[in-house]
């Protein structure tokens, strides 16, 4: 690793927050706990939180002014139609050679996470993305042994696999080269979320590497999370809108990459359509022959409850409650 001096910033940590006062300390402490042989900065964007999130960020910025670089909005940018805040406010000011992502309700648990990822990227200049597994924490419960684990061992991941995949990658695990986001494509700017288009951008540049080590925690069910917001109001309408926006994103990606990944982009969009039907319990479509491959990708529990509800709807509610009660 060649650095002019140890003070040169090698990694820019990009973090976006909104109403996460109960979680943001864990997030910031995870950043500060990192043991590295290089310097890094923390770029935080708070989207006009109405709770104490901004005050906590100010506290850390006062204590660690050399690392913490906050932007504290007075007006909510997402409400004004700006979906991908990182691309507007964090990426342009990144001074590091690499960017590490982590949102304000997730956190890192391994003190050597950044060092491991940087060492790999430095040794493999043709690698576009390094990511890893995550443990899962459900809101209101203790940290579980469940993991967000896309693959069963550490390995190289091809561009086609990055596009057409059965499991998501934890956002808090992503590290990529900063020059990848200096000019953002339309499919990133217009996407309803930021992690998937970042992975598409990486796929267009080359292969990725997966580390089968849980170095962060992914929180489920937080009151300010995107998933929780999706479940509020007209859920079915939101799911349809989400699919249509993601379909446009994949079509735009297909055009911008000259059709190199046409089949994978089409299949990824079709999988999202299928999953929205699962989420809205449109089981006639879920069980249709054309969706058989996607259905087999579901875990055994989801398949069990789908079949159970279809075959014995009157018993489904009782079985569902008993099953979930046993998990608590």
Image (cartoon, grey):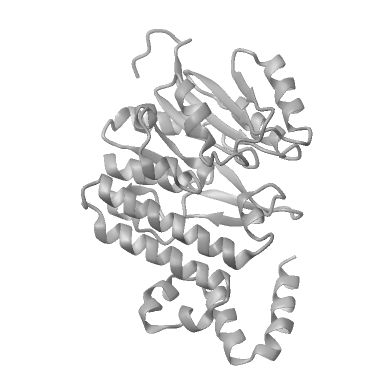
Q: Residue 47: where, in percent of width, then height?
A: 65, 34
Residue in the picture at 57% in, 27% down: 34
Q: In which quarter of the image is residue 3?
A: top left
Q: Quadrant of residue 120?
A: top left
In the image, residue 79 sits, relative to residue 36, either above or below, namely below
In the image, residue 118 sits, relative to residue 229, either above or below, namely above
Q: Which residue is at the far top?
A: 5
How many numbered marks does the figure carry?
A: 0
| Residue 158 can be seen, yes or no | no
Q: Residue 303: where, in percent of width, then height?
A: 53, 78
Residue in the picture at 44% in, 67% down: 273
Residue in the picture at 54% in, 24% down: 35
In the image, taking residue 221 as reference, residue 256 lies left or right, namely left
Quadrant (top left, top right, bottom left, bottom right) of the N terminus: top left
Residue in the picture at 61% in, 50% down: 226
Q: Which residue is at the far front?
A: 80
Q: Residue 60: where, in percent of width, then height?
A: 70, 21
Quadrant (top left, top right, bottom left, bottom right) of the C terminus: bottom right
Viewer-proximal residue, 327 or 250?
Answer: 250
Viewer-proximal residue, 245 or 111?
Answer: 245
In the image, taking residue 13 as reference, residue 297 lies left or right, namely left
| Residue 218 can be seen, yes or no | yes
Viewer-proximal residue, 39 or 91?
Answer: 91
In the image, residue 165 sits, relative to residue 14, either above or below, namely below
Q: Residue 104: where, in percent of width, then height?
A: 64, 37
């Amino acid at each position: 690793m060649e650095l002019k001096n140890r003070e040169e910033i090698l990694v820019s940590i990009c973090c976006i927050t909104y109403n996460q006062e109960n979680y943001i300390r864990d997030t910031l402490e995870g950043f500060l706990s990192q043991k590295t042989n290089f310097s890094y900065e923390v770029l935080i964007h708070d989207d006009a939180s109405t709770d104490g999130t901004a005050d906590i960020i100010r506290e850390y910025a006062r204590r660690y002014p050399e690392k913490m670089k906050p932007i504290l909005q007075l007006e909510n940018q997402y409400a004004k139609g700006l979906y991908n805040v990182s691309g507007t406010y964090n990426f342009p000011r990144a001074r590091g050679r690499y960017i590490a992502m982590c949102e304000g309700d997730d956190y890192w648990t391994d003190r050597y996470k950044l060092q491991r990822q940087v060492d790999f990227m430095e040794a493999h200049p043709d690698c576009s993305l390094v990511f890893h597994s995550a443990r899962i924490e459900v809101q209101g419960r203790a940290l579980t042994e469940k993991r967000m684990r896309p693959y069963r061992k550490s390995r190289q991941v091809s561009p086609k696999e990055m596009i057409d995949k059965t499991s998501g990658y934890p956002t808090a695990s992503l590290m990529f080269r900063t020059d990848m986001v200096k000019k953002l494509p339309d499919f990133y700017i217009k996407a309803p979320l930021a992690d998937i288009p970042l992975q598409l951008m990486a796929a267009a540049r080359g292969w990725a590497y997966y580390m089968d080590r849980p170095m962060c925690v992914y929180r489920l069910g937080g009151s300010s999370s995107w998933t929780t917001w999706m479940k509020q109001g007209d859920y079915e309408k939101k799911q349809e809108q989400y699919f249509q926006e993601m379909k446009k994103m994949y079509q735009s990606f297909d055009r911008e990459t000259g059709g190199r990944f046409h089949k994978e982009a089409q299949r990824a969009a079709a999988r999202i359509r299928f999953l929205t039907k699962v989420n809205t319990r449109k089981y006639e479509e879920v069980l249709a022959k054309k969706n058989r491959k996607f259905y087999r990708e579901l875990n055994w529990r989801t398949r069990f409850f789908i079949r159970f509800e279809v075959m014995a709807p009157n018993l489904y509610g009782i079985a569902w409650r008993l099953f979930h009660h046993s998990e608590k």
